[in-house]
Amino acid sequence: SYFCCEGGLRETSLVSVYVLRGFFDEAFKLFDDIPDKNVISWTTIIGGFIKIGKFRDAIESFRRFLEMGLKPDSFTLVRILSACTGWGIRRVLGNMEKARAIFDGMAERDIVSWSAMIMGYASNRHPKESLDLYFAMQRENLRPDRYSMVGVLSACASLGALELGEWACGLMNRVEFLANPTLGTALMMYAKCGKMALAWGVFKEMEEKDVVVWSAMISGLAMNGHTNASFALFGQLEKLGFQPDGNTFMGFALYALMLHYGCLVDLLGCAGLLDVANELIKSMPMEANAIVLEALLSGYSSFLVGDEMHPLSGKLYAKLSELAKELELASYVPTTEFVMYDMVEEEKEHFLGVHSEKLALAFGLISTKPTDTIRVVKNLRVCGDCHMAIKLISKITGGEITVRDNNRFHCFLR
């Protein structure tokens, strides 16, 4: 009876607190007991379903919401669009194209529709398209909201584009930025770019931290090799009464959920081990969902080794040749044991010289100023030979080089 008041305001506030703290079962139970549910309470519970990945329940709640004759506000619409993205667009590969066709055919597009598309691209592994659409929105003189900025920052994190991410952070009101947990996940962008000091600074300054923010910080520390700090932060999370979610545990690889199987299938696909990926899917204790199947499909890509169609390929290979000579003068000897193919020593040395991280580094050197930091993002582990070569190249050029692979960050600074 203490919580009963007009419009269930106190009950709604408590539901919001439960959702923020990760106590979803308590939130859903209390929501069911609210006699007069309003727009705020419905929006809160829809957001709760989305947080734990129950997109279909979120959509069903929205249907009940409409049946009650309530009118959704902008916050409700953004959440239900997010649910549709999670439940619908991810179910069938290529649905982003359908969503874009609908978007392009709209007579009038407001900030809600722009934000939904920007977030949709970012969450479906199309970071470049997400950023392109954001810049198109700017050309329409529309002011971005927090949801479009989350999409932009997620895209920057995927690309490892630190400078662009910092520019995006600079566009936002700092008070709102630190007060809002959703925008606070920008710290993951800093973490994925290897800037843990900046990520930690954002984390400490944030006024409210939900389980998503805590999970992002824990994963960021683990990703950057700060294992002890990651476990210590996890201990603080438990002491504060938060309920860790699957993303939190994924930082420690403690147990396998559907998302974790998707990550492993994606990794096997990137390594070309599609038969192993198929066997893994068959051995799963649950039926594979769209996330896992999309990860498998992404492994069936066609590409050409040694493709020289890029307009700067001439300069790139000339730079590689120049670096090879400078490395030889620096007493570098290729470690050919990292080439597993049965071939003569000279051929092994050639293959080492055109490893993807060296190609990316050469491209960075011909495309940036000598004082610029070069960041290379790689989806597989950096081999020992490339690690030594990049270390020497950093010494030769006097520049800072950061390489992010699937395991950790490698920072080289003279």
Image (spheres, grey):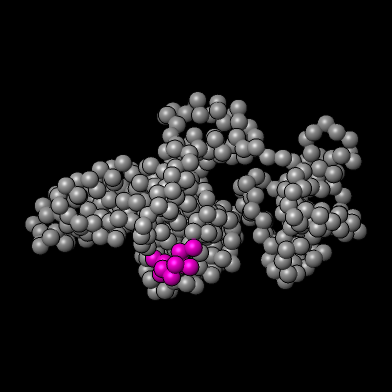
Q: Quadrant of the N terminus?
A: bottom left
Residue at the farthest left position = 1
Taking the image as drawn, is residue 150 in sight? yes
The answer to whether residue 78 is left or right of residue 371 is: left
Give the image location of residue 313, x and y in percent.
78, 53
Residue 195: quadrant of the picture: bottom right
Q: Residue at x 59, y 58 (%)?
A: 160
Q: Quadrant of the C terminus?
A: bottom right
Residue 140 in the magenta stretch? The answer is yes
Residue 335 in the magenta stretch? The answer is no
Dominant secondary structure, magenta = loop
Q: Nearer the viewer, residue 309 or 276?
A: 309
The answer to whether residue 251 is left or right of residue 181 is: right
Classify 3 as above or below 307. Answer: below
Residue 60: quadrant of the picture: top left
Give the image location of residue 371, x and y in percent.
72, 71
Q: Residue at x 90, y 41 (%)?
A: 346
Q: Residue at x 37, y 69 (%)?
A: 179
The answer to whether residue 106 is left or right of residue 155 is: left
Point out the stretch of residues depicted in magenta. Answer: 136-145
Q: Nearer the viewer, residue 126 or 1?
A: 126
